[in-house]
Image (cartoon, helix red, strand yellow):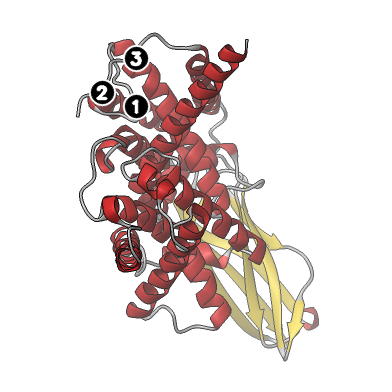
Amino acid sequence: MSRPPRPARNRVEWVTFGVAATIVAATATLMVVQSFGSFDPAAPVAEPAGAVRATEGHWYVPVDVTNNGDETAAEVQVTAELTIDGVTTTGDQVVDFLGGDEVAHLTFGFDADPASGELVIRVTGFAEP
Amino acid sequence: MASQQRNDAATWGSEVTDLVRAASGGLLFGIPLLFTVEVLWTGQHASPQRMLVVLLLSFVPLVMLNRTEGFRSRRDVTFLDAVSDAVEGVALGIALVLGALVLLGEIDGETPTRVALGKIAYQAMPFCIGIGVARHILRPRGAGRDGDDSDSGSDTDSQFNATVADIGASVIGSIFIALSIAPTDEVRLLAASRSPLHLLAIMTVSLLVAYSIVFVAGFAGQDQRHEQSGALQHPVTETVVTYLVALASAWAMLAIFQRADGPWHVTLAHVIVLGLPAAIGGAAGRLAV
């Protein structure tokens, strides 16, 4: 089916075009600004975030993994080691992708109270995507 | 003065119809990739230069498609018209993707600007193509419509048959869009981070999108649907029924792939998340099948 050809833009269509052009220009400008920003290598670090939660003999430790660099880190390995009376329990988690300045929220679970021993949380490695 | 106001209102109405039609096409084409986590990851680690290239590439198919069909009621005559409509299409794609990613929890206040820009750039590309083929995907109003709609409502039997046909079309449309998403882990991943309030927001948006596709976007059959009588043919009732059918279809698809056997509240969250693409497909199915 043929459509009527388009006449000159009216006032309403100019308003739409103005808003659209602003959105596209703002997005493109943000990308250009980002491209001129710093490019520090990925530097993910893990640290406890908030209080330990206890439920029916299990203790849950919230952990934030923050990428302090600008580049993205992939397959970020996070390890939590709880040592009580010389016995070490280890937990591992992997964050698939962590962008620059991005934070991933993890939780590690233990069968003993982390307050009764030494808890070490760290990033053991990551890959470049 | 009054005549000028009436003209403005009519022009705004026509503009909104064009934009809703564009958004409907974008959602129909782009929603499956919104549920593809690899696309999000690609955007997450893309460099700003690459994002800019992807954003610029999104214009190419839109300009070409605007020269043939596009999303406007009226045909673009000049190359400049096609380019200006492409700007509107890309902006609409960006806005749709931003809204969808916020709704699904992929972008929030903690998301770094670079990550958000990457996700938007890569996800907006299929939305832009969908916007460009909006008039191709579903027949525009006035293109004619075969079937039983012309005599539906003439008696109880035809009303019943039309209602059954509509429900069947919704099921088929839901399956067409959501079947490829149902067996993936993305439904589980996206649902896991959604609170009850977020799920209510997803339900609200699903209903609004379903209503817009059937009754606002100006596709074929819209006028007939506004005129149809009967308990299930009122626009609001029909939209709610379309959504309920989409939710039922979503649950059935999850059950087939053995992903509906968790606790009821977890399954409900999965059904609501999968219900978004299912509702979009179901609404389109009512017009296309």
Question: On the image, numbered disc 3 is attached to which residue?
Answer: B81
Q: Which mark is residue B73?
A: 1
Identify the residue under disc 2: A3
Which element carries disc 2, helix, strand or loop? loop
Kindly identify the residue that appears in the image at 35 percent across and 26 percent down. B72
Badge 3 and badge 1 both on one subunit:
yes
The nearer-to-camera label among 3 and 2 is 2
Query: From what the image shows, is residue A17 above or below residue A80?
Result: above
Q: At 32% across and 28% down in the image, what residue appears?
A: B57
Percent x, y of residue A121:
65, 67
Quarter of the image holding residue B156? Answer: bottom left
Tell me which chain the residue with mark 1 is part of: B
Q: Identify residue type, mark 3.
A: Asp
Residue B161's label in the rendered image is: none
Q: Nearer the viewer, mark 3 or mark 1?
A: 1
The C terminus of chain B is located in which quarter? bottom left
Q: Nearer the viewer, residue B1 or B106?
A: B1
- Quick one: label 3 or label 1, which is nearer the N terminus? 1
Task: Give the percent coordinates (x, y) of residue B258.
Answer: 37, 81
Q: Is residue B184 left or right of residue B199?
A: left
Q: How many marks?
A: 3
Q: Are marks 1 and 2 in contact (CB under 8 Å)?
A: yes
Is circle 3 on the same chain as circle 2? no
Provide the chain ID for the residue under circle 2: A
